[in-house]
Image (cartoon, grey):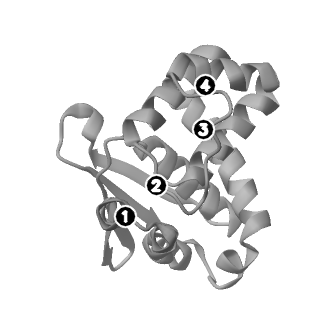
Amino acid sequence: MVGLIHKLLFDLVELADGTEAVAEVKRRAGVPKDKEFRMDEAYDDQEWQRLLAAACEVLNVTHEQAEEAYADLFFKDALRRWPMWFQMSRNAREFLERQPRIHNGFATGVQDPEARQSINDKFKLEKHDGKLVMHYRSPNQLCGLYKALAHRISNHYGEKASIEETRCLKQGDPECEIHISWA
């Protein structure tokens, strides 16, 4: 997991509850208060999981509520930070077809080959007539975040997507399988 994800989690906590809440999240997760997270470095998935769990505790929200709030913040940040990603796509399907390559682009700055491969292995996309099937594998189990972002992307393009998860890591499946179709 690259450090941008951590930075946005801290932004979410700070917006909701202030800078002291960020320090408390780091304390509960066993992360030094002064630790900085860089966009071009990969960080331990277990550390991320501890940070997310601590953020849920501090903000008094469920994991699902945290993923929804995070999706809002991440989407707004992506629109501001990378407007070209959205301009390059005529519709949500084109954007979501491009998403695994965008995600894997973050791995190019990661020096450790094993960490880079771990990032690249998280998403595998199947393209079918009328729908996309995303296969997601990550110990972070952020399939809810992916689904929330897919909804926001569809809404951005003025479309309504049907998103169904037929398999889920959280239910003991070896991967999440997310079907996205448009009317």
Disc 1: which residue: 112
Residue 165: % across, % down: 33, 47
Amino acid type at mark 3: Glu
Rendering quarter of residue 68? top right
What residue do we see at 34% from left, 80% from top? 129
Earlier residue among tags 4 and 2: 4
Amino acid type at mark 4: Lys
Name the element at disc 1: loop
Give the camera-side residue of 138 and 27.
27
Disc 4: which residue: 26
Residue 11: % across, % down: 74, 39
Question: Is 82 on the left or on the right of 66, as rendered?
Answer: right
Disc 2: which residue: 42
Name the element at disc 2: loop
Identify whether 154 is placed above or below 1.
Answer: below
Amino acid type at mark 1: Asp
Residue 14: % across, % down: 78, 30
Foreground disc of the pair 4, 3? 4
Rendering quarter of residue 55? top right
- Asked whether the beta carbons under mark 2 and mark 1 sit within 8 Å of each other, the answer is yes
Name the element at disc 4: helix
Label 1, residues with CA under 10 Å away: few <14, some 14-19, many ≥20: few
Residue 18: % across, % down: 82, 24
CA–CA distance in space, label 2 to label 1: 8 Å
Disc 3: which residue: 68
